[in-house]
Image (cartoon, rainbow, N blue to C red):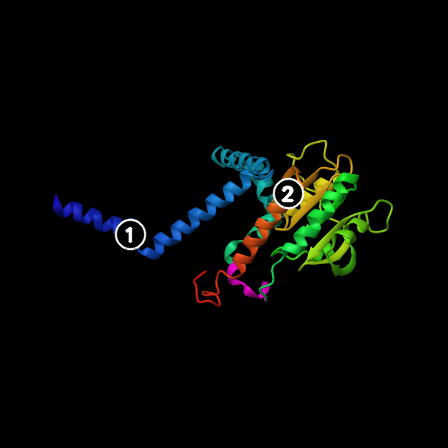
Amino acid sequence: MNTESLSLFDRISNLGLGYVSIGIIDILDILIVAYLIYKIIYWIKETRAWVLFKGIVVILVFTLIATILKLNTILWILSKTISVGIIAVIVVFQPELRKALEQIGKGSIFTSFMRFESNSDEEKISSKTVDEIVKACAKMSTAKTGALILIEQSVPLGDHERTGISIDAVVSSQLLINIFEKNTPLHDGAVIIKNNRVAAATCFLPLTESTDISMDLGTRHRAAVGASEVSDALVVIVSEETGAISLAKGGVLYRNLSPETLKNMLYKKSKSTKKKLVLWKGRTNDGKNQ
């Protein structure tokens, strides 16, 4: 009996079905793959790609049924169209794939280690700049002057900046109010603030495709949310119809803000950005750990 069992075990081992040696590297490999699959599924469920993904799953199930039932005509058609289908999937999912790559590029690992993106300790937005923006928004809100202001963070806004007119001026409330004054050449479009300076005006922004935006909001708010979806910029909006002040960041729109609330939100982002820049320096000038 033992001889027969040993012989059977040897035959199974020869077929590659015996004991498998699993090391730490193998476990790490499995965990990484499992995490990536989880993140991909989670990301797909949060976008409109989920509906398209379910359609692809239906086609795969139909292919499996055709294979089991040996429906040769259907299998022949599927085999001839699979190469075209891969290209079609890439085209259909192009916005989602681009957004996923942008999210990877905005990850905290890249922001912390890729130091060439920020070569100085200068804040992306200083307290003086915040004060001038809030002062301008408060006055434009009272006068119901529409405004759209982008404040660049770690993700460059060069693509949007090139669509407008270069200004390169110090940020001041008077300048912002004059830019967005009705019937002036620069009032239409967005203003981009970079490194505490007004970089450009009349810039065009991508409109969001999100269905969560209220129907009573117009193009200005949709452009603000769209810009915040493809970058980490802070986008300040003043409604021309109601004078309400809003802030868009990370694809989320915060509406009906008071000037004080807007100032606090911008200050909070300014402080967190500064902390991120010095995180990997180790020690400050006074020798304390950060």
Q: Where is residue 285 drawn, in percent x and y?
A: 49, 68
Q: Where is residue 174 drawn, in percent x and y?
A: 78, 52
Q: Amino acid at mark 2?
A: Glu
Side of 238 where 61 appears, left or right:
left
The residue positioned 49% from the left and 60% from the top of the image is 279
Q: Where is residue 261 drawn, in percent x and y?
A: 62, 42
Image quarter hosting the N terminus: top left
Instruction: Tell me the SS state at disc 1.
Output: loop
Which class describes the residues within 10 Å of circle 1: few (<14), some (14-19), or many (20+)?
few
Which class describes the residues within 10 Å of circle 2: few (<14), some (14-19), or many (20+)?
few
| Residues rendered magenta in the picture | 112-119
Quadrant position of residue 162? bottom right
Q: Which mark is residue 159?
A: none
Instruction: Name the residue beneath numbered marker 1.
Output: 20
Mark toward the viewer: 1 or 2 = 2
Q: CA distance from mark 1 to mark 2?
A: 63 Å
Observer-nearest of 264 and 27:
264
Observer-nearest of 289 and 201:
289
Q: Amino acid at mark 1?
A: Val
Image quarter hosting the C terminus: bottom left
- Mark found first going from the N terminus, 1 or 2: 1
Q: Is residue 202 visible?
A: no
Instruction: Tell me the SS state at disc 2.
Output: helix
Instruction: Name the residue beneath numbered marker 2.
Output: 260
Side of 240 where 15 appears, left or right:
left
The residue positioned 21% from the left and 48% from the top of the image is 9
Q: Are dots 1 and 2 in contact, CB under 8 Å?
A: no
Q: Is residue 117 magenta?
A: yes
Magenta stretch: dominant SS?
helix
Q: Is residue 149 magenta?
A: no
